[in-house]
Amino acid sequence: MGFDVTASYATVVDGHRHVWEVPRLWELSRDLPTFDYPVTDFDGMDLDCWYGRVHVPTVRSVLTHMKRIERADLTHPIILSQSGAVMDGVHRICRAWLAEQATVLAVRFTIDPPPDRVEPYPPT
């Protein structure tokens, strides 16, 4: 399907960065029920979901993300955390938004799995 097997999802909790590896999230969410997620529910359109303090948004990196958006497989559901945060699938949401598609397939954890690792934040 062309998914990035090195991708991860991270969020900061109480001064620590909690990180989930996306291939593990795929495995853990495989049997969750799917539903239609309204693209307009995604509140990250005006957030920096990809660069943060680690990466610099170069023309090349923007084009790389654009290529991933164009190739995004909308038959594969996005993965939402218990709170509704997008743990995997922002490129699919972008593709659906560009195609003026109202929804994407989604699954949602009722209880988030433990993170793969916890790191100090900000990094030392």
Image (tube, grey):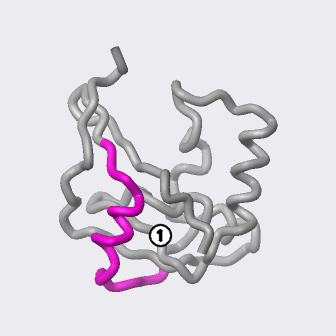
Residue 51 as seen in the image, left or right of residue 115? right
Residue 21 as seen in the image, left or right of residue 55? left
Q: Quadrant of the N terminus?
A: bottom right
Residue density around tag 1, few if under 14, some if 14–19, many if 20 or more, within 10 Å: many
Reply above or below: 26 against 62. below
114 vs 95, nearest the viewer: 114
Residue at x-position 33% and y-position 44%: 19
Residue 83 as seen in the image, left or right of residue 43? left
Q: Position of residue 25 (x, y in %)?
A: 34, 64
- Residue tagged 1: 78
Residue at x-position 27% and y-position 30%: 119
Q: Which residues are magenta?
A: 19-36
Residue 81 as seen in the image, left or right of residue 77? left
Residue that extends furthest to the top in the rendered view of this protein? 124
Residue at x-position 25% and y-position 30%: 16
The number of numbered badges drawn on the structure is 1
Q: Mark 1 is on which residue type?
A: Ile
Q: Quadrant of the C terminus?
A: top left
- Whether residue 76 appears in magenta in the rendering, the answer is no
Reply above or below: 102 against 50. below
Tag 1, which secondary structure? strand
Q: Position of residue 71 (x, y in %)?
A: 71, 68
Q: Position of residue 46 (x, y in %)?
A: 61, 43
Question: In the rendered image, which quarter is residue 112 located in?
Answer: bottom left
85 vs 21, nearest the viewer: 21
47 vs 9, nearest the viewer: 9
Question: In the rendered image, which quarter is residue 17 located in?
Answer: top left
